Amino acid sequence: MEYAKRRLSGAVSGRSTGRRRVMRGRMAEILEFRANQFNGVVIAPAELPTDAEEFDENLAASIDQWSSDGYLTIWLEIPKVKSALIPKAIDRGFDFHHTGDDYILLTKRLVEGSNIPPFATHYIGIGGVVLTPERDLLVVREKFGVGGREPTLKLPGGALLAGEHLGRAVEREVLEETGVKAEFESIACFRQWHGYRYGKSDIYFVGKLRPLSKEIVMQTSEIQECLWMPVDDFIGSENISNFNKQIVRAALESDGIVQSFIEGFGGPDTREYFMPKHLIDGSGVVPFPSDLASFS
C-alpha cells in the first residue's frame, strides 16, 4: 500500500492544550497517508514521528491541507510504542474508534456528518451438539455460572478466534473442553443477544457434530463436569435451561444448513457459506473443500 508524503514551508498555526501557537520559518511535514474508499485519509502508522511536539505540528499542517484537498475524514492508527502522541491527537479533535493489542485507532471528521463506519458490533461464539448414534449427548458444566447463578449442564463451546471458520471453531472448542474429537456437519440455529458485553452484541451459533471418539479428557481450568448423557434426559430435565433444551431440539429435528462455497468472491480460506444441502449442486454452490490448500 502506497502512502503520499508532502512538505509545507512557512507559518503553521496550531492548537495544543488550549493555547494557540505559531511555528515560523520551519518545515511542517504533511504526514504520510493514503486515501480510503470513504474519501478519507489513512495516516501511515509506521511513519509517525516519535516526538509529540513534532507530531503535533505536522498533524496541524496535515489537517489544514487535507481539508483544503476535500477529504472527509482522517483515520489515525497510533502504535502502543508511540502512545505519547494520543493526547496531541485528542487536542486536535480526534475521537477514539477502537483499540487492538498493540495500537489504538482514532478518527476525525473534516466535514460534519461524514461517514465513519463503526468498529465491530458483535462477538461470535458457537456451541456443539455432539450426539452419538445411541443418542447420547456430550455436555459440560462450567466452574462459574452466568450472572451469579449456579452453573448447569450445557453444550461445550466458546468464542471464535480471529480468522477462524465456524466448523473449525466448534471442533476445536469441543476437543479443548472435553477431549472428544468430533466432525462438524451443519449449523442448526443461532441466537443474537444485544447488550452482551462492553456495549456489543453477541451471536451464538449451534453446530451439529458427529463424534469420532468417546473418551473424555476434561479441561479442568474451566470445566467442573463433563459427561455423555441421554439426550432425552437432557431435554426432560428440570435443571436444564429452556434455551439449552430448545437449541438441542433444533439440532435433533432439523438437518440445518451446511458449510459450502460460492465462487467469485475470494477463496474458502477467507469465506464460508451456509446453505440448505439440496442447493449444493456443484455448479452455483459447491461443497466446502475439506483441504483448503488443495482448493483451486
Image: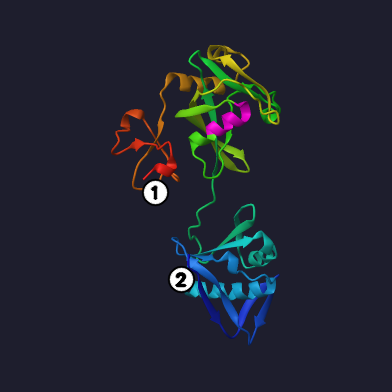
Would you place residue 31 above or below residue 296 in this image?
A: below
Q: Is residue 118 above or below residue 201?
A: below
Q: With respect to residue 14, does 10 lie above or below?
A: below
First along the sequence among labels 1 and 2: 2
What is the secondary structure assignment of the residue under circle 1? loop
Residue numbers of the magenta segment: 170-179
In this image, 231 relative to 22: left or right? left
Color theme of the render: rainbow
Say what amino acid the circle numbered 1 marks.
Gly
Q: Going by the image, does 166 lie left or right of 23?
A: left
Q: Secondary structure at mark 2?
A: loop
Give the left or right position of residue 54, taking residue 165 as reference.
right
Taking depth in this image into account, of 90 and 46 the one nearest to the observer is 46
39 or 151: nearer the viewer = 151
Residue at which label 1 appears: 266
The residue tagged 2 is: 70
| Residue 29, magenta (yes or no) | no
Q: Is residue 118 visible?
A: yes
Q: Amino acid at mark 2?
A: Gly
Q: Residue at x 64, y 25 (%)?
A: 217
Q: Position of residue 144 (x, y in %)?
A: 70, 28
Residue 140, labelled with which disc?
Answer: none
Q: For the point 65% across and 82% down, which residue is it?
A: 23
Q: Position of residue 193 (x, y in %)?
A: 55, 35
Dot 1 surroundings within 10 Å: few (below 14), some, or many (20 or more)?
Answer: few
Residue in the image at 59% along x and 38% along y? 195
Disc 1 versus disc 2: distance between alpha carbons? 33 Å
